[in-house]
């Protein structure tokens, strides 16, 4: 085991890089939200509420991430390394917002599968996995919150509850793959010789579904791999920080792309 302090580039440095990159992604998500509300005014209120909620939680996630960096770089500046806490409430808040965002997005796509397929069984499986991933993320956040007052070694927390982090992320990967394959299959079923005006849109939706589903899945896999192989730094946390932005991006791209055409499965 390599001993890293809080000030180590492998801990604080990579966390800063992850937060800065997530802020860039937040700008992209905010722009997509603006485009959605400007161009898709005829969508149902519940879909607008979903998009608005995701944007709100993205803002909260970004604020919590920025405060964590501020806390470690400004508030704790000059504090001896051995006296610095290895965790903060703002850092513990980030998995809360990430978990909520992920659950909203994955739950929405499971609902879209229900509308596209006309069947419940695939959606029920997706909702079940989504609930398991939600519980895992919230349990991870709860354990982090409980250990903040004791100012523990953060790597000790990872050692004790690493199985929880890995399990939650692996469930998310499986769910992403199920959603991607199911959406591609049922969207492709919309293509008929009598639906030529929407042919281009259908192809775009299939391409988008594959791209965004693979991106979120591969990022989750990268988080798990870095967590298992580099436990004593924050490389995994840097990747995890902008994972929520990828899910939000996938939702907003879907809503914006399909905003003009009333295909089955659009709400």
Image (cartoon, rainbow, N blue to C red):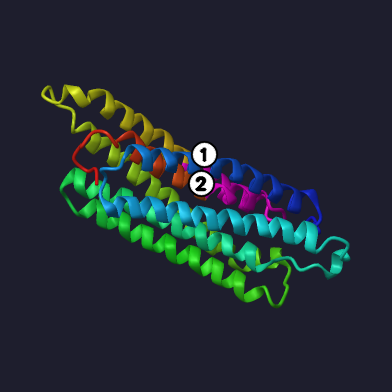
Say which residue appears at 72% left-offset and 53% top-offset. Answer: 233
Of marks 1 and 2, the one in the foreground: 1
Closer to the chain start, of discs 1 and 2, is 1
Q: Quadrant of the N terminus?
A: bottom right
- Horizontal side of 158 relative to 243 (left or right) equals right
Residue ID at (88%, 62%): 78
Work out whether 137 lies above or below 152: above
Q: What SS does tag 1 mark?
A: helix
Q: Which residue is mark 2?
A: 245
Do tag 1 and tag 2 residues touch (Cβ < 8 Å)? yes
Residue depicted at 58% across the width and 72% down the height: 143
In the rendered image, which residue does mark 1 sit on?
28
Is most of the magenta stretch helix, strand or loop? helix
Q: What range of the chain is rendered magenta?
A: 216-243
**How crowded is the residue under tag 1: few (<14 C-alpha within 10 Å), some, or many (20+)?**
some
> Is residue 143 in sight in this rendering?
yes
- 234 inside magenta stretch: yes
192 on left or right of 174: left
- Indicate yes or no whether the magenta region holds residue 86: no
User: Residue 152 placed where, x, y %?
Assistant: 72, 72
């Amino acid at each position: 085991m390599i001993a890293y302090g809080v000030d180590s580039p492998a801990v604080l440095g990579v966390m800063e890089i992850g937060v800065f990159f997530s802020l860039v992604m937040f700008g992209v998500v905010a722009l997509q939200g603006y485009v959605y509300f400007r161009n898709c005014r005829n969508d149902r209120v519940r879909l607008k509420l979903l998009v608005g909620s995701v944007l709100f939680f993205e803002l909260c996630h970004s604020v919590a991430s920025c405060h964590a960096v501020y806390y470690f770089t400004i508030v704790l500046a000059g504090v001896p390394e051995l006296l610095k806490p290895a965790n903060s409430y703002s850092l513990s808040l980030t998995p809360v917002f990430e978990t909520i965002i992920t659950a909203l997005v994955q739950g929405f796509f499971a609902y879209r599968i229900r509308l596209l397929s006309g069947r419940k069984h695939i959606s029920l499986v997706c909702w079940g996995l989504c609930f398991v991933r939600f519980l895992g993320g919230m349990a991870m956040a709860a354990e982090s919150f409980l250990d903040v007052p004791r100012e523990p070694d953060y790597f000790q927390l990872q050692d004790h509850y690493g199985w929880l982090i890995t399990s939650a992320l692996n469930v998310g990967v499986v769910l992403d793959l199920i959603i991607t394959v199911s959406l591609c299959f049922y969207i492709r079923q919309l293509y008929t010789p009598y639906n030529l005006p929407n042919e281009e849109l259908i192809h775009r939706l299939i391409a988008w579904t594959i791209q965004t589903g693979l991106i979120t899945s591969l990022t989750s896999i990268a988080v798990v791999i870095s967590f298992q192989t580099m436990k004593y730094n924050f490389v995994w946390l840097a990747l995890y920080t902008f994972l929520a932005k990828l899910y939000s991006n996938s939702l907003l791209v879907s809503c914006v792309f399909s905003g003009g055409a009333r295909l089955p499965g659009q709400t």
